[in-house]
Image (cartoon, helix red, strand yellow):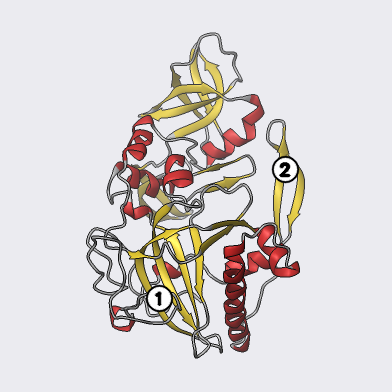
Amino acid sequence: MAGDLVSARLESNEKGPAASDLRLERRWRRVLFGSLEARKGQDVLAVDEAVANGEWPLSGAPKELDTGTPILATIAGERAHFERVVDPDRYLMERTLARWGVEESFPPELEEAALALAHDAGEGRRDLRQVTTLTIDGASSKDLDDALSVLPPQADGAIRVLISIADVDAAVPEGSPLDVAARARGTTVYLPDGVFPMIPRSLSEDRLSLLPDVDRAAVTVELRIDPDGVVTAADPCLSLIRNHARLTYEGAAAFLDRDEVAGVPEPARQPLRWLRAAASRLGAARKARGGIALQRGEVKLRCEGEGNPTEVVPLRETSAHRLVERWPAGWPLAACPPSTASKTSLTPSGSRASSTMPTTSGSRPLSAPGSPPGGSRLSKSSSNPPP
C-alpha cells in the first residue's frame, strides 16, 4: 500500500524491467480509512483507493452496522481491526488524516508523560527575562514558538536583535517515547478544520508555549546588525526568557503603519520600532546583493457540513508578516563556531560588558555561547546562518 517500503529482485526480459520476490520491509501506516463490506459472510474493509487496492479481512465490527458504512480501522498483521464509525460531518477530514497518516491524538500514556515532565528551572542558561520580549502570531494561535527582542542602537549605530525559539529539547528527553512520537509525526499539521500538533497540546500550547508573563526555556541567537545591514556577529545560547507582549499580526501592523497603539502595549512599542529599523537594514542589504521578493498568494479555506470547502479567502500579507519573515526561526539553530562566538552580558544600556555571560541564579556559566551545557542539543555548527 502507499508508503510501504519493499525490497524486490529486478530483472529484465523482452517486455522490459520486471520485479519479483517482493518483500515488505517496513510499514509506517497504522490506520486505514474505508467502508465496511461483506464477502461470503465475512466482514472486509474496502480501503481508500488512494492508499491501497483491494480489501482487507476485518475483525471487531459491530454486527448492527450496515454495509457501506465509512469506518476507521487499525492494521493488525494481515488483518484490519475495527476502531470506530466515521462521523458523517467529518468524512473528508477523517479520510484526509488517515490517507496521509496524520494522528489526531496521542495515546493516554504519552499524554500522562507530557504532564509529568519536569519544569526547566533555567540552570546554566543566559537570563534574558529582563529584556523586553514579544511574540507576533495569528489571533487564534496557541502554540507560540518564537519570540523577538531588541536592544537600542549602540554608539556605532549597530542594533542587537535576539531571536528565540522554545526549547522543546529542555523538557523532552532524546529517545524518550514523546521524542519518538514527535519524530514519527515530523511536524504540526494545519488543516482548514483543525490543528494536529507534533507533541501533546499540554506541551505545545501550554507548558512549552511562549505565553505571556511566564518564564520559558529557549534557544536564542543574538544578531548584531550594523547600519549597512551586515550581520557582524551571531551568538547563540541556551536562554531563559519571558514574553512581555503577545501581539497579533493585525495589531502590530496597525501600529507600524498607522501608529495605532490599541494592539501594542507601551513597553513593546519602541522595541517594535527598532525591530522594523533592523529589518529594513537587512532588506536593503539583501536588495543590494540582487535579492528578489517573490509575490505569492496564500488563501484560507472555509469549510462547512461534511468538510467540503465552501469559500476561498485570500490572506493579505501585512507589514507585521514581512517583519517576522526577516527573522526566521532557524537563526537560533544556525550555531556559529565557538571561535567566532563572543561572550557578552546585557547591561541596562545594552552595551557590551564583561566577558562572562549572565546565567540564572546558582547555575554554571556557559563555556561559550555556541557550547550548550551537557544534555542539551543544538544543531550542527555553521558559519553560514540562514539568509
Q: Quadrant of residue 257?
A: bottom right
* Residue that sits furthest to the front in the current view: 348
* Residue that sits furthest to the top in the current view: 64
Q: Residues within 10 Å of mark 2 (few under 14, many from 20)?
A: some
Observer able to see residue 287: yes
* Labels 2 and 1 touching (C-beta < 8 A): no
Q: CA distance from mark 2 to mark 1?
A: 49 Å
Q: Residue at x 50, y 36 (%)?
A: 104
Q: Quadrant of residue 59?
A: top left
Observer able to see residue 317: no
Q: Which mark is residue 225?
A: none
Q: Residue at x 61, y 63 (%)?
A: 266
Q: Quadrant of residue 324?
A: bottom right
* Residue 102 x/y as whole percent: 50, 41
The foreground one among 307 and 129 is 129
- Tell me which amino acid carries mark 1: Thr
* Residue 228 x/y as whole percent: 56, 89
Identify the mark nearer the N-term, 2 or 1. Answer: 2
- Tell me which amino acid carries mark 2: Arg
The foreground one among 86 and 125 is 125
Residue 283 higher or lower than 171, as above or below: below
Residue with the mark numbered 1: 347
Residue with the mark numbered 2: 302
* Residue 219 x/y as whole percent: 39, 63
Q: Residue at x 58, y 86 (%)?
A: 285
Report the side of 132 relative to 296 (left or right): left
SS label for mark 2: strand
Residue 374 higher or lower than 21, as above or below: below
Residue 298 higher or lower than 77, as above or below: below
Q: Residue at x 46, y 35 (%)?
A: 105
